[in-house]
Image: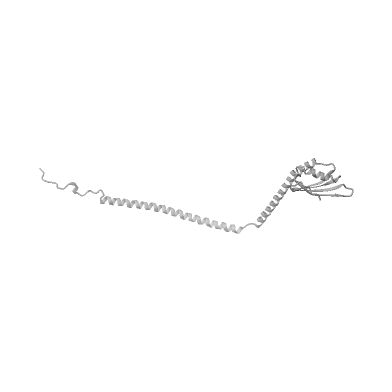
Amino acid sequence: MKLRVNLYSDTLFPPELRLSFSRLTKALIALICLLLLTTAVFWGLNSSLESDKKQLMLVKKSLDAEKQDLEAELAKRGPNKALVAEVELKAQQLELKQKLFGKLNQQEVLTSYGYSPLMTDLASVADAKLWLNRIQVNENRYIFEGFTSSPEGVPLWVDKLKTTTTLKGHAFASMTMSLGENQPLAFKLTSDAVGSDKELVK
């Protein structure tokens, strides 16, 4: 037989809290220790970086001072006037040699490719009544000097010249004849490349 009656149910009691004062205190202490440890680590890293920075600054100052000394020494030296004059002289000599080399090349081309075909063409139109004693070639200008035993032989020979490969397209701008004492009839022909086969006789 029950002598006590429980009129309070479990729902009427306050809920049991998992976080007590002691637990909260321990957690706070652990957090403070973690923050202190983190601060100490960062402080150590910062001190190391500051030390490295100071060393680098010292190296930079040393290099800057060395640079200034080298620049000052270089400014004092300056260019050597004798060497500069020698370089300029060598450059002028080189330019003159290059110009001379170009002229020699032109002369070589003129000799190799100008006289050889011309002599071949002159041989093909050779005339027993006419002979040459001087031939001059200057770019596209030809000068022939010689003698003839017949005055009419020169114009006939000129007509033959205009059919050759070398003198095709050239006009004889002048032709002079002279007769010396006890000498055959001398003549001089001058030919210019004018793109025409006309003959001008003075």
Q: Which residue lies at the image location 44% right of the left edge and 54% below the top edge?
A: 51
Left or right: 133, with 10 as reference point? right
Colour scheme shown? one colour
Query: How many circles with numbers are drawn on the protein?
Result: 0
Q: Which residue lies at the image location 80% right of the left edge and 44% below the top edge?
A: 159
Q: Which residue lies at the image location 34% right of the left edge and 51% below the top edge?
A: 34
Q: Quadrant of the N terminus?
A: top left
Q: Quadrant for residue 85, please give it.
A: bottom right
Q: Nearer the viewer, residue 158 or 77?
A: 158
Q: Nearer the viewer, residue 97 or 138?
A: 138
Measuring from the top left, give residue 11's x and y in whole percent.
19, 47
Measuring from the top left, give residue 27's x and y in whole percent.
30, 50
Q: Which residue lies at the image location 26% right of the left edge and 51% below the top edge?
A: 22
Q: Nearer the viewer, residue 90 or 130?
A: 130
State the residue lying farthest toward the front.
198
Q: Nearer the viewer, residue 65 or 13?
A: 13
State the residue lying farthest toward the left.
1
> Up-down: is 26 above or below 116?
below
Left or right: 169, with 54 as reference point? right
Measuring from the top left, give residue 125's x and y in whole percent.
80, 41
